[in-house]
Image (tube, grey):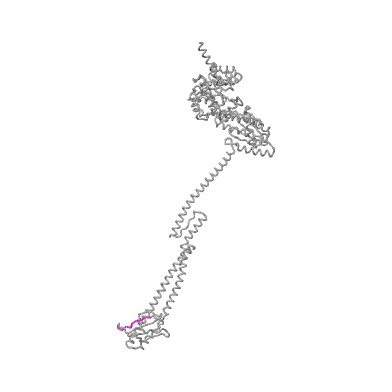
Amino acid sequence: MTFYKRKSIRKTLMLVLLLTSSSALVLATLGFAINDRYSLRAEMIARLHSQAGIIGNNSIAALVFGDAESAEATLASLRGEAYIVSATLFNRTGKPFATYRRDGESTPPKTLPASDSGAIDNALFVMQPVLLDHQPVGNIVIVSRPDYWQSSQRNQLFTLLGLFVLSLCLSAVVSARLQRVVTKPILKLAATARQITLSRDYSLRAKKLSKDEIGHLVEDFNGMLEQIQLRDSELQRSRELLEQKVEERTQELTELTRELEHQAYHDMLTGLANRITFDNHLSMAISDAQRSNRRVATLFLDLDRFKVINDTLGHPIGDKLLIEIARRLSLCLRKSDTLARLGGDEFAVLLLHSNPRAAEEVAHKIIASINEPIIIDGYNLHMSTSIGISLYPDDGATAAEILKNSDTAMYRSKDSGRNRYTFFTQEMNTRATRRLNLENKLRAAIRHNRLSVYYQPKRDAETLRLVGVEALVRWFDPEEDAISPSEFIPLANECGLVSAIDEWVMETACREVLSWFRGATPDISLSVNLSPANFIRKDLSQVIANILAKTGFNSQRLELEITEDLFGPNTEDSCSVLKDIQKLGVEISIDDFGIAYSSLSRLKQLPLHTLKIDQSFIRDLGQDPDDEIIVKTIINMAHSMNLKVVAEGVETPAQLDFVKRNGCDTVQGYLLGRPAPGAEIQNLLAARRQVAAELRAHF
């Protein structure tokens, strides 16, 4: 089997045909040879019988009359038959009567054979009776030449072998032709398959050359190619679609990578560099300045009162404002300078190869540009900025130190009145250290209950009768004594401590005021300031309810003062919280009214009870006609909205007279009483009750 496996199908088929035809020829030749052997033998015996019959018939008379000489003459007639070598005529008794022998040939038999025919010394013989009237009168035995029929047999065999070889050659030729008939379609099919494999062209088809099984195989092969072509077309479409998707996805990933890289180093809102990029540029600029012995200037900018705009007009307006500020800042700088937004409303500028004078000129340009009116969505906004300037190597040796010092200088600009620039000095680090120490002390003061509550009287504008008090937090440090609220309240807002302070002040004031009246319902109102930071909490109304329940204070005597800048166009959550507080019976008052951006239509929707006119308008009454008009307008507007009006910061009789004449309900200020400890307010109430008792007794 292994031998056949190594052969091609053409050679194998040809070999099979040759073996088959050769086997048939061999079998046929053997058959013919065997048949010829027996046929020649039978023919020879038949001829011998014929001669024996002739000789026997011719010898009857000689046997009957005992004429041996005549009998031998008759036997001699066999000399003409070359294949007969001897003959013996036996009498009735089985004794030789007459004999014939060819010269030098075989000796005639002297006894009768046991059979009618056979072989004596490889020579064929026949024995046949001589009959007279059907009665045997003797027997005749004729012997043939031994090699005669064998020679004939050899001639026949050689003839058969010749025919066998001729037939084998013919079968080889026929086999070659036949195998071509069989293998040609297969080879054509194989060639087509090989061509398809090399070209991957599945549109090619094998040619059908016959209608037999190979033809069916070609049909099946072509059918398979059609399926492969369909699958290949589908695969090609899928591959093209996949390549398209991969290309699109790769493009998306490339764009996303580019976008993420841009986001990593740029501000998303303004498109400016971010803190990471600015820090890198500042570090490289410092390295370059070290080598070239030059200066680098850093400007740290913070927009003044930006939080007020963001809280009142909403974040969309604030975002548009930041974009416009970024545009204006870019116009003030060179291409070699770096402008970055560090976060919120903070920007930073890096000036390469600069000096104090050049930095000052840039700061002037920036302040002037930002002071120009900005109109956004119909709002005419007036902005300013506070700038801190530090230089390398004058103000620090590292990028972090330079940026920190410019930040410190910026805070000095804010403390100095805003809308200005300030160069860093080493003294400013002392102030920064002061802020850090103050924050730590404030946390400790809250934790150890070291804050105090003072109360400022609120009086009726007509009678000047004490009608309420405003609770104000005060801080007396063991080391520094009194620390101004203007210093620690902004710090508390920055550090996230103001909510804890507001809650403590509210609970302490409710408890203390209630003690003044020995548990009875107070006949004065208690005002408590509530920072906007509290309105981030969804549970603010519940916190207030818990304080009222814990202290037992009457909610109708509690008034919460909120700042106007809490309310803008997107403050639905704050309004909802205020309505929940109003349901407790607590009144709501807007403090410092007139300095922010709240709209009158928005105020109308709020659950308000009182407006407090900011002291900046009260301060110039009698001196500034514009402030007088504003105060009058606020009072009239508030009364038209059924709101009470409180004038705060009343410090002169002229101011008191003006607000009284224009219908203000309540007044508050140093003229009418400074903030004082609870004991002093309790004494005022006791004196008021004593006067009232004396009046009742007198009348």
Residue situated in front as seen by the camera: 366 or 115: 115
Residue sticking out furthest to the right: 293
Residue found at x 51% / y 57% = 195
**x then y, percent, for residue 84:** 40, 82
* Visible residue check, residue 555: no
**x then y, percent, for residue 539:** 50, 29
Q: Overall secondary structure of the magenta stretch?
A: strand
584 versus 124 height, above or below? above
| Image quadrant where residue 258 sits | top right
* Visible residue check, residue 107: yes
Q: Which residues are magenta?
A: 125-133
**x then y, percent, for residue 368:** 64, 30
Residue 672 belongs to magenta span = no
498 versus 35 height, above or below? above
**x then y, percent, for residue 671:** 58, 18
Residue situated in front as seen by the camera: 290 or 64: 290
Residue situated in front as seen by the camera: 188 or 111: 111
678 versus 27 height, above or below? above
Residue sticking out furthest to the top: 699
Residue 127 belongs to magenta span = yes
Number of dots carrying numbers: 0
| Image quadrant where residue 132 sits | bottom left
